[in-house]
Amino acid sequence: MASLMGTYYHNIDAKGRLNFPTKLREILGVSFYVTKGIDSPCLTVYSQEEWDRLSEKLSAVPESKAGIIKRWLFSGACEVTPDKQGRVLIPQDLRMFAGLDKDIVVIGANNKAEIWDKARWDEMNSGIDMKDLLATMSELGF
């Protein structure tokens, strides 16, 4: 699968429909999975291939260790298929979790995409410490 990348600004309508970026749809496929973010107040989007990989990995971990992760990811997850206009319906519970109201940012993040409320995205990016980022990259060998 090609890397998902880029930043796309969109609106979500009153019914919870989001015009999902064409470039990302082309990589994600005919339908894809949306769930709660693990480390951030956003939604995470996976292709069928990545969703299957994640599911298999979690299935191999003992319930005592993975139970909370499974409940977190799968309880809010949904499969979405864009309509003819490229819109996907984001369920209300997921919109509430991520604080999605009107102005939305969809980003590519390598093997997944993320859907952010624009104000949260801007706030998170304004708090990035470049020294910390560079130190982490150095630790990882970049």
Image: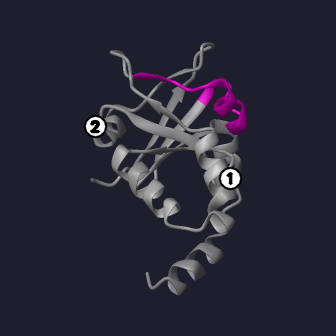
Residue underneath mark 2 = 26
Q: How was this image coloured?
A: one colour
Left or right, residue 60 beside residue 97 = left
Left or right, residue 110 beside residue 64 = left
**Residue type beneath disc 2:** Glu
Residue underneath mark 1 = 124
Decide if residue 39 is in sight here.
no
Residue 24 in the image: x percent, y percent?
A: 36, 40
**Residue type beneath disc 1:** Met
Residue at horizontal 55 percent and vertical 68 percent from the top: 61
Give the image quarter of residue 111: bottom left
Residue 5 in the image: x percent, y percent?
A: 39, 50
Q: Which residues are magenta?
A: 87-103
Q: Is residue 11 above or below residue 40?
A: above
Q: Secondary structure at mark 1?
A: helix
Real-space Cα separation, disc 1 to disc 2, in angstroms: 28 Å
Residue 37 in the image: x percent, y percent?
A: 62, 49
Q: Nearer the viewer, residue 70 or 18?
A: 70
